[in-house]
Image (tube, helix red, strand yellow):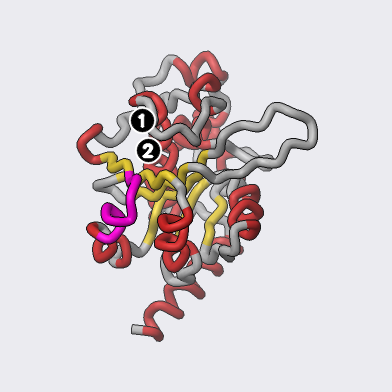
Amino acid sequence: MEMQQATALLSKEQIRALPAFQNLSAENILVIQTLEQCMAIQTELHAVAVFGFDTESKPTFKVGEKSTGPHLIQLSTHEKAYLFQVKPDILNFLKPILENEYQLKVGFGLKNDVSSFRHKGIEPKSLIELSKSFSSFGYNAQVGVQTAIALLFQRYFVKSKKISTSNWSVKQLSPQQINYAAADAYAALLIYQHLYHQQLLPPQIRQQIARILQGSADKA
């Protein structure tokens, strides 16, 4: 606990001085643009119990302008990150995974994602919001992925505003966008698993996960 509290007191400057977070290598990041690509990985996706999860959308700049996102949906395992460029057929492919109550989707800031998916006729299930899981470190407010990585792994997770607010609806994502998007989902998975195994998740989340795991066992 002393180490946790000491880490929690790190300033932004100290966080930036930490060793860099190690993302998945480029060959383990798959950009999915077609239904054919989806079908080729269908079996491996349906075998996954826990995904790191995130979405990206083209930013809106005008007052009253509604987002048409998500334009990119990221799912990550320990070995691979899958970046799905959203089109109707790809969204239909992902719907059973997003609505599967026995597959956990863990991430940060998922409230907006739920709203976006509902507008597209998808009701996501088993989403685990990690941002409020750091009270044992002295954080009662929400924590972002950058702070979480610093707290748990003593690594600096780079967050570029230029990349985060870039156009995610383009046909060809830049290498910087691909790396950024994969890192968000991959980091979320690592954070979840660390919190889970160290029994640091809040009681309500532990109860939610226990119900899901029990339901999955009963189904099997």
Q: Secondary structure at mark 2?
A: helix
Q: Which residue is mark 1?
A: 179
Count of numbered circles in the view: 2
Instruction: Name the residue nearer the viewer: 140 or 187.
Output: 187
Q: Is residue 162 above or below residue 124?
A: above
Residue 139 drawn at (x, y percent)? 63, 39
Camera sees residue 5? yes
* Crowd tier of the residue under label 1, counting other residues whose Cα lies within 10 Å: few below 14, some 14–19, many 20 or above: some
- Residue at screen point 47% across, 64% down: 95
Magenta stretch containing residue 74, yes or no?
Answer: no
Q: Which residues are magenta?
A: 32-39
Q: Are marks 1 and 2 in contact (CB under 8 Å)?
A: yes
Residue 191 % position (x, y): 43, 45
On the question of residue 3 being in view, the answer is no
Query: Which type of secondary structure does the marked residue at label 1 adopt?
Result: helix
Q: In the rendered structure, which amino acid carries the disc numbered 1? A: Asn
Q: Identify the mark at residue 182; answer none if there is no mark.
A: 2
Q: Residue at x 28, y 48 (%)?
A: 78
Q: Nearer the viewer, residue 206 or 59?
A: 59
Q: Is residue 201 above or below residue 124?
A: above
Q: Amino acid at mark 2?
A: Ala
